[in-house]
Image (spheres, coloured by chain):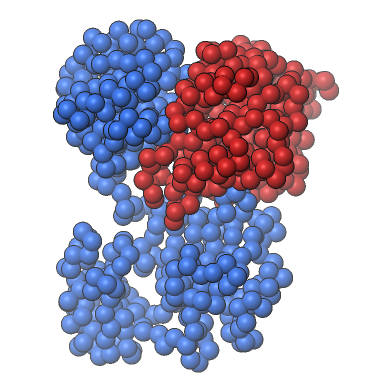
Chain colours: A blue, B red
């Protein structure tokens, strides 16, 4: 789960990392005073706010209130701005980069730092990037911090502050179950004070049971994806017009790929998972229908899952409510003959192989 | 022959009294696997499918006679408690761990893998269907036994149902399996493609290796590099799911996501092809490629 900017800042502050003073307001009347020049930022869950006019500067209270009024209500990439962050504008002498992410292949947290802050870390050349894995059994070690400071070539007072921020960032990474914590830029002011210019935090969805306060709606999923999530259904909306429903994430992807090979394009990724509960199958099928596909392609391999009970769920929902589109079904495995009978009774087109089913669905989608 | 499991494998089921634990204890026993103990705190003294239940792993180790103590462990406990029970298994001397549990936090997975390294334990998963060696009648997992046949092809996979699909098409064409290992669909897992490949390379019962990969991460690319650098002589065949998956979307598995241009199917297919592996475009092509190679 990607946190909104305000929450990322609060997360850093909670772990003792200096951030510019600021507050969120929903209108000019929320702003009573400012203590110097400020930056006003639209609080929306998308990047590119600056270009869209969602970031402004002001040096007096009057001016700040006017800018707040300008930004509130703006539409930025489909998101209506409801609140803005008014934060102390910091003078920046130098911009550094500091980030920690999960290196999945190493199975460890990866600390990254660079003297070239302010830019996308992906564009920083390898030789200007400090990287160190942190073994979770021993944590971040002093020698790693020394290596990092040597590479960044910082003077001692600044180096000490950067060290301190790095230690706190790793503590936050572990405590908050982060997948990514990034401070970019990590700013050094002309007076030599180190402060987080901007922050990005992604929290592991699977850890939310430990962080009940974080249960906010994910900003970048569609309403239908949200509905599916609430019902515990693994569902992704895609660009094509063929609704794909299968069991198992890998098999669902493979079905979409087979469709692609046959010249069709998937409009949904719907993974039934290990369920053969007809009620759950019905619910999943209803979600699929809401995505309004032109054709539905169903691919079930019954290993542990019984094919006939899955078929029964689909049969009942199609008979009672209609499928809304032609359905091509390939069902194989445990109790497959019985399942095929049930599906034929519901008026579905059956196929024996994944390729055959994908081909039929692709053809139908072109005719439709 | 097979990897990881053999006829001497004796399994402890953690969470045996739960629905999944009970159902799969029965299925593992039906396959011929020795399930010697179950653990559910507070349920000690009960029996599930003829298997004695203990309150803790230590109690199981203490009460079972020396030759009947478990040397493999399978975990069905819910995600918040999985790490703790894996530590319990390792602290009690078990060195083969299969974690079926899905949705374990990544931080927990990282800590537990680091500890497993220190203990020199083999961890399979989390979020895996487990391991099965049909010829050894050994299954520590949840896969449907009916699709597997004893044979000489080693299968390494990141998913569940897709693996059954691939294996079923292999079995139908007469290509049985020495061992099939599910690595798990999470970002951080124990055993990697590289490690499993080394085990199959060293196994006299395995003639060829089938990899079932998917988008996300770079484990398949690392395996491709390893084929060349380690000089893997057994032929490698692969299928990669997610060629049409859009970037930035998590496709069901926590680990199946293309992030910032990394982890694409394209890159994996290219790396494997360059390393000399034969890559199938659809799952059913795998047995055809095996046949073409004269296996």
Left or right of B190 on screen, residue B240:
left
* Numbered disc total: 0
Image point (62%, 82%), residue name? A153
Which is more toward the observer, B117 or A83?
A: B117
Residue B11 picture location, percent across and down:
69, 23
Q: Name the residue rendered at 20%, 23% in the picture.
A: A326
Place residue B176 in its image quadrant: top right
* Position in image of residue A283 (x %, y %): 28, 28
Foreground residue among A288 and A122 = A122
| Closer to us: B120 or B291 | B291
Name the residue furthest bottom: A191
- Looking at the picture, how far across and down is residue A99, in whole percent? 52, 66
Q: Quadrant of the N terminus of chain B?
A: top right
Where in the figure is residue A245, as x and y percent of width and height?
33, 29
- In the displayed structure, A12 sits above or below A152; it is above
Residue at the (47%, 22%) spot, across then down: B284
In the rendered view, does B277 fall on the left or right side of B136? left
């Amino acid at each position: 789960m990607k946190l909104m900017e305000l929450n990322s800042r609060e997360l850093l502050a909670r772990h003792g990392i200096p951030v510019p003073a600021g507050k969120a307001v929903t209108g000019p009347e929320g702003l009573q005073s400012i203590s110097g020049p400020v930056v006003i930022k639209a609080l929306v869950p998308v990047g590119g706010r600056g270009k869209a006019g969602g970031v402004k500067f002001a040096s007096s209270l009057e001016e700040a209130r006017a800018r707040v009024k300008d930004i509130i209500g703006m539409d930025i990439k489909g998101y209506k701005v409801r609140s803005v962050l008014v934060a102390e504008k910091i003078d920046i002498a130098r911009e550094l980069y500091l980030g920690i992410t999960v290196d999945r292949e190493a199975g460890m947290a990866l600390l990254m730092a660079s003297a070239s802050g302010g830019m996308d870390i992906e564009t920083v050349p390898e030789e200007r990037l400090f990287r160190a894995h942190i073994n979770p059994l021993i944590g971040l070690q002093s020698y790693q911090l020394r290596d990092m400071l040597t590479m960044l070539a910082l003077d001692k007072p600044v180096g000490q502050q950067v060290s301190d921020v790095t230690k706190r960032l790793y503590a936050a990474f572990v405590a908050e179950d982060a997948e990514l914590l990034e401070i970019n830029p990590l700013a050094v002011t002309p007076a030599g004070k180190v402060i987080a210019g901007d922050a990005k935090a992604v929290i592991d969805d699977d850890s939310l049971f430990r962080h009940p306060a974080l249960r906010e709606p994910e900003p970048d999923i569609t309403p239908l994806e949200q509905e599916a999530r609430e019902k515990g259904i693994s569902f992704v909306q895609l660009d094509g017009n063929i609704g794909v429903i299968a069991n198992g994430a890998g098999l669902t992807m493979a079905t979409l790929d087979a469709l692609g090979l046959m010249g069709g394009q998937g409009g949904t990724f719907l993974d039934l998972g290990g369920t053969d509960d007809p009620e759950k199958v019905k619910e999943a099928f209803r979600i699929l229908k809401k995505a309004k596909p032109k054709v539905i392609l169903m691919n079930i391999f019954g290993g542990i899952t019984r094919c006939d009970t899955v078929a029964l769920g689909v049969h009942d929902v199609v008979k009672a409510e209609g499928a809304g589109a032609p359905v091509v079904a390939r069902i194989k495995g445990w109790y497959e003959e019985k399942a095929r009978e049930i599906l034929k009774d519901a008026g579905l087109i059956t196929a024996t192989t994944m390729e055959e089913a994908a081909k039929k669905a692709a053809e139908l989608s072109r005719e439709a | 022959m097979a990897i990881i499991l053999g006829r001497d494998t004796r399994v402890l089921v953690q969470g045996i009294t739960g629905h999944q634990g009970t159902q799969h204890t029965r299925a593992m026993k039906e396959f011929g696997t020795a399930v010697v103990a179950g653990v559910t705190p507070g349920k000690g003294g009960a029996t599930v499918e003829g298997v004695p239940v203990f309150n803790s792993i230590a109690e199981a180790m203490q009460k079972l006679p020396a030759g009947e103590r478990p040397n493999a462990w399978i975990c069905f406990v819910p995600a918040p408690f999985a790490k703790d029970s894996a530590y319990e298994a390792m602290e009690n001397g078990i060195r083969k761990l299969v974690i079926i549990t899905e949705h374990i936090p990544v931080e927990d997975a990282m800590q537990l893998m680091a500890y497993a390294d220190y203990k020199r334990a083999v961890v399979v998963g989390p979020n895996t269907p487990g391991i099965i060696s049909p010829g050894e009648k050994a299954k520590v997992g949840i896969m449907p036994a009916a699709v597997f046949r004893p044979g000489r092809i080693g299968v390494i996979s990141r998913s569940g149902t897709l693996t059954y699909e691939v294996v079923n098409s292999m079995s139908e064409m007469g290509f049985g399996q020495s061992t099939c290992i599910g690595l798990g669909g999470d970002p951080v897992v124990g055993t990697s493609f590289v490690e499993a490949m080394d085990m199959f390379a060293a196994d006299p019962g395995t003639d060829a290796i089938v990899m079932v990969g998917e988008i996300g991460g770079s484990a398949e690319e690392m395996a491709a590099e390893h084929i060349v650098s380690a000089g893997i002589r057994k032929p490698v065949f692969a299928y990669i799911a997610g060629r049409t998956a859009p970037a930035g979307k998590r496709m069901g598995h926590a680990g199946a996501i293309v992030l910032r241009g990394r982890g694409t199917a394209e890159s994996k297919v290219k790396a494997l092809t360059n390393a000399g592996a034969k890559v199938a475009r659809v799952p059913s092509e795998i047995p055809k490629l095996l046949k073409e190679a004269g296996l």
